[in-house]
Amino acid sequence: MALIADERQGNDAAVDAMEIFIQSGELYFGAAPAIISTMLHSRIAITFWHPKTKIGGMCHIVVPDSPEGSCDMHYGDCAIAEFAKLAGKYKTPAREYEVRVYGKKDGEDAMQDDSINKGGGKNIEKIKNFLKLNEFDLTELDIDVNGSRKIKFDLHDGRVYKKIIKKTPLIKKESVKSDVDAMEIFLHPGELYFGRAPTIVSTLLGSCVAATLWHSKAMIGGMCHIILPESQGGKCDMKYGDCAIAEFVKQAAKYATKTNEYEVHIYGGSDMFPGMKKSEGMKIGDRNIEKVKELLKFYKFHIKEIDTGGSNSRKIKLDLSNGSVGIRKASK
């Protein structure tokens, strides 16, 4: 999955740097202020940063090269090619980027092991070749022999922070508690996240609307940040309410759960300019609220709480370990 925040001029855009957590097989590209992080075990992470424009991103690669006819951000060649496209979109030459590769070598045998879950040896050589083919210059190669690592990449100054975490499982299925601290994933306007605990998903809302989902038994759920109520012209994107709610239905089915088993909260839809006269078509907040409520009821989701309208912005935090939602309101 690629989270590409390449248009962040909306009235709901965040001012302070927020941490965006990517899981294995995901990619993020955007502009400062933003901090991108991931938990790296035996796979490979690559950071790209353009010092002049302060844009860049990170990918978490599962497999170095894709099978014929398939392209996904799980694969190193596909992710690197995607970064090359984004560099071209922003008219920034690939050679101007600082590129750092992080992996893990599980003992001496890993240097000769080409299995899909090793970060050393032949896989690293393949990644280096893919970077070269896409005209990226490798700035740093960091292969560690110790425990798992948390990687944090600050797009403001290009710094990468590493913290070693030894023998720590990502999720303990038999318990809600985990040895890993919950990671906060921040959603920009038009983005959607669905996953497992331990995770905290957050966003900032003005006239946009967020729906949070949580399944109490499976400890899964997510959040969407909707900008407009309906898609038009056959184009489907997570910024549209009908597309985002339909995606949640797909995710519920993927995890063998039913929509009516989820607790759903709806937030946002504020009137950020209460003193201004508006036509019906300009009342985006109201239209977003009504469409989201209509779709959730249609798909038989259980709506537990609605906190919408008003003229305040909201910061929303969903904790997937217990389903709690924190709300902080601020006057405009």
Image: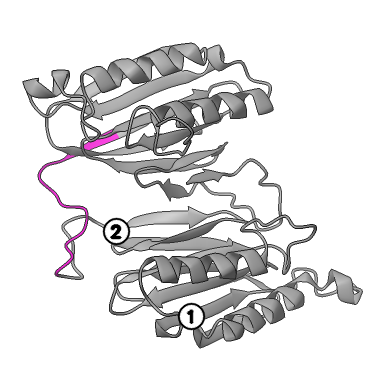
Task: Say whether residue 105 is magenta.
Answer: no
Return the residue at label 2.
182
**Residue type of the residue flagged with mark 2:** Ala
- Alpha-carbon span between mark 1 and mark 2: 21 Å
Q: Residue at x 47, y 46 (%)?
A: 1
Q: Is residue 234 left or right of residue 255?
A: right
| Span colored in magenta | 162-174
* Residue 91 shows in this picture: yes
Q: Residue at x 50, y 42 (%)?
A: 34
Label 1: state its secondary structure. Answer: strand
Which-is-in-front pick, marks 1 and 2? 1
Q: Nearer the viewer, residue 321 or 229?
A: 229
How many other residues sit within 10 Å of disc 2, few (<14), some (14-19) or many (≥20)? some
* Residue 310 shows in this picture: no
Question: Residue 35's x, y, as percent?
Answer: 45, 41
Task: Classify residue 317 by image quadrant.
Answer: bottom left
Q: Earlier in the sequence, mark 1 or mark 2?
A: 2
Label 2: state its secondary structure. Answer: loop
Residue furthest front as drawn: 68
Q: Is residue 100 left or right of residue 239?
A: left
Question: What main secondary structure does the magenta stretch of the protein show?
Answer: loop
Q: Nearer the viewer, residue 158 or 296?
A: 296
Residue 264 shows which numbered tag?
1
Question: Residue 145's x, y, as percent?
Answer: 13, 27
Q: Residue at x 35, y 72 (%)?
A: 256
Task: Classify residue 160 by image quadrant.
Answer: top left
